[in-house]
Image (cartoon, rainbow, N blue to C red):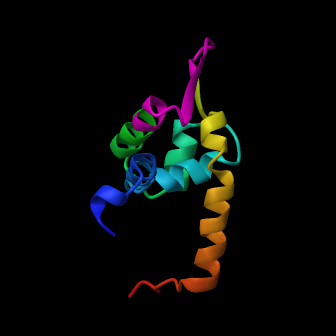
Amino acid sequence: MNQSNLCPRFEKAITILSQRWTGLIIYQLLSGPQRFRSIESSLPISGRVLSERLKDLEQHGIVKRDVYPETPVRIEYSLTEKGLALEPVLKKVEAWSQEWLDVEEPS
């Protein structure tokens, strides 16, 4: 397929979702709002990279960051309506992976 035939919106969506860890972060947030440490402990990702990805997802309107004025301050990340709209897509990818992919055992 010629590059010029790609839909620019599809290309942008794939570019966003194919960034390393992004899909897994979104998938993790499908279960509801979570704090940074909770996301970090559930994925093998450094805090720096997680912070970068969350900021990127916020800029794209996929994730929102809520700050609660408590002591200490509580910050939670959750999916926006735009982010939640990715749930059926990610569930289809999950089903596809279950049917078609093998998990390599660590050596």
Q: In this view of the protein, which residue sits in the foreground, 52 or 2?
A: 2
x%, y% of residue 27? 60, 53
Q: In this view of the protein, which residue sits in the foreground, 40 or 24?
A: 24
Residue 68, magenta (yes or no): yes
Quarter holding the C terminus?
bottom left
Q: In this view of the protein, which residue sits in the foreground, 70 or 31?
A: 31
Apparent side of residue 23 relative to residue 74 in the rendered image (left or right): left
Which residue is rendered at x = 69% and y = 56% of the image? 88
Vertical relation: 60 (above or below) 88: above
Which residue of the protein is positioned furthest toward the left in this rendering?
3
Which residue is rendered at x = 63% and y = 33% of the image? 80
x%, y% of residue 33? 66, 36
Which residue is rendered at x = 40% and y = 42% of the image? 53
Vertical relation: 43 (above or below) 61: below
Quarter holding the N terminus?
bottom left
Which residue is rendered at x = 61% and y = 11% of the image? 69
Q: Which residues are magenta?
A: 56-74
Residue 61, magenta (yes or no): yes
Apparent side of residue 99 relative to residue 54 in the rendered image (left or right): right
x%, y% of residue 62? 54, 37
Which residue of the protein is positioned furthest toward the top in this rendering?
69
Across the whole image, how many numbered discs are drawn on residues?
A: 0
